[in-house]
């Protein structure tokens, strides 16, 4: 009996010893785990600074000439001669096309002869009337006949003049659509004529932005035809009516185009410099994490000094209110102070209080007006 009791006590002691040892081992491992620190995350950082900020309104517009027409014939006729080449620069009044006018000129001469005869008769009857040889009614009839004949001459002269088609204004011609010997009808297009300097750009804006637009404001126009190049102009007309279907209003700006780089019909991106220049704390857009519950950034703060003498840095999350954007930048209205170092990339691996190391060898883009780079 005593032997059994001793064996039982030994077994119980072994069990309790093993359990106690396991607990000691577990506590030791937990202590090691709790004392383990994640290595600091490498991020890029930038100090928040105030920058001048020009409010802008953006839209897509269409270019057109101040004066541009498709030159056509007012009357029908056979093309006798063409006095221009496609693409020529012409001046106002320059002859472009002459139609066959032989029959019209002959008719004009006939009317002119009849007018001359009527004038001779009228002058003779006027002298006869002075000596009471003809009546006043006869003289009045001859005067009316003379005016009628002269009106016929003027009408026929207008028909002859229409056979010569001239440039209505100075500009550059397009590609000719007629040839010598071709018969043209009234309204047939002969060639396009465009005045290329200056040009107009028309664009629509929503009615909410009407208060930001005023005559004389500067517009900056860009087009994918010339990447990285800008064209500057001024707002010259604001439509007095808002489209009831779209609730947009039309704006017209005038651009200088001395080298004729731009052509009517091109589309362009328009930026209107609206309002006075303001100052905003500015950060790269990559610094902001956009969330449904609020936009956040990570601000780098010092938490003492490490064993190597270097400052220990941690990232503290902060909610911010963002403002307008331009290019790669975003304005911060609240949540950050001037001089704060903000994480601009690498936020995905951070949590509040994470240790960080700043390495700015490769920085995210932070351009006010980024330019397209041709590959």
Image (tube, helix red, strand yellow):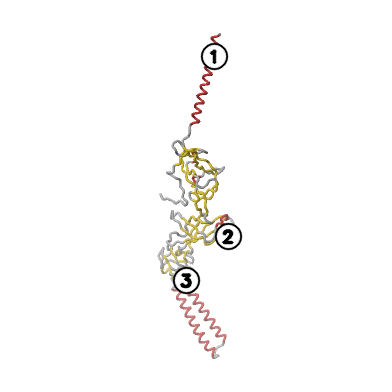
Secondary structure at badge 1 equals: helix
Location of residue 338 in the rendering, given as x and y in whole percent from the top left corner: 51, 47
Q: Nearer the viewer, residue 302 or 170?
A: 302
Q: In the picture shown, does residue 294 fall above or below 240?
A: above
Secondary structure at badge 3 equals: helix
Mark 1 to mark 2: distance in Å?
103 Å
Depth check, mark 3 against mark 1: the one in front is 1
Location of residue 253 in the rendering, given as x and y in whole percent from the top left corner: 51, 60
What residue is pinned by disc 2? 241
Q: In the picture shown, does residue 280 fall above or below 137?
A: above
Q: In the picture shown, does residue 113 fall above or below 15?
A: below
**First in sequence: mark 3 vs mark 1:** 1
User: Which of the 4 image quadrants contains residue 241?
Assistant: bottom right
Mark 3 to mark 1: distance in Å?
132 Å
Mark 3 to mark 2: distance in Å?
39 Å
Q: Which mark is residue 160?
A: none
């Amino acid at each position: 009996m005593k032997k059994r009791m001793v064996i039982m006590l030994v077994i119980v002691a072994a069990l309790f010893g093993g359990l106690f040892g396991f607990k000691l081992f577990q506590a030791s491992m937990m202590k090691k785990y709790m004392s383990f620190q994640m290595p600091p995350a490498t991020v890029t950082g930038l100090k928040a600074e105030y920058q001048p900020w020009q409010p802008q309104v953006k839209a897509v517009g269409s270019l057109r000439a101040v004066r541009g027409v498709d030159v056509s014939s007012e009357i029908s006729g056979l093309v006798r001669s063409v006095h221009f080449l496609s693409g020529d620069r012409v001046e106002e009044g320059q002859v472009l096309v002459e139609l066959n006018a032989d029959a019209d000129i002959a008719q004009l001469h006939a009317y002119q002869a009849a007018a001359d005869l009527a004038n001779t008769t009228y002058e003779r009857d006027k002298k006869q009337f002075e000596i009471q040889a003809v009546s006043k009614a006869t003289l009045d009839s001859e005067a009316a006949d003379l005016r009628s004949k002269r009106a016929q001459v003027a009408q026929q002269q207008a028909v002859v003049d229409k056979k010569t088609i001239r440039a209505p204004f100075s500009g550059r011609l397009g590609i000719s659509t007629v040839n010598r010997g071709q018969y043209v009808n009234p309204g047939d297009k002969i060639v396009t004529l465009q005045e290329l300097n200056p040009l107009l750009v028309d664009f629509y804006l929503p009615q909410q932005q009407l208060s930001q637009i005023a005559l004389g404001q500067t517009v900056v126009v860009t087009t994918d035809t010339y990447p990285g190049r800008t064209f500057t102009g001024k707002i010259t007309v604001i439509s007095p009516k808002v489209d009831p279907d779209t609730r947009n209003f039309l704006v017209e700006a005038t651009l200088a185009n001395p080298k004729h780089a731009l052509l009517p019909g091109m589309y362009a991106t328009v930026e209107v410099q609206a309002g006075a220049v303001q100052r905003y704390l500015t950060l790269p857009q990559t610094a902001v994490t956009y969330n449904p519950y609020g936009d956040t950034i990570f601000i780098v703060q010092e938490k003492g000094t490490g064993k190597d003498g270097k400052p220990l840095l941690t990232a503290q999350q902060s909610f911010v209110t963002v403002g307008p954007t331009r290019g790669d930048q975003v304005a911060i209205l609240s949540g950050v102070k001037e001089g704060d170092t903000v994480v601009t990339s690498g936020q995905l691996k951070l949590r509040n209080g994470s240790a960080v190391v700043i390495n700015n060898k490769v920085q995210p883009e932070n351009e006010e007006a980024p330019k397209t780079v041709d590959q």
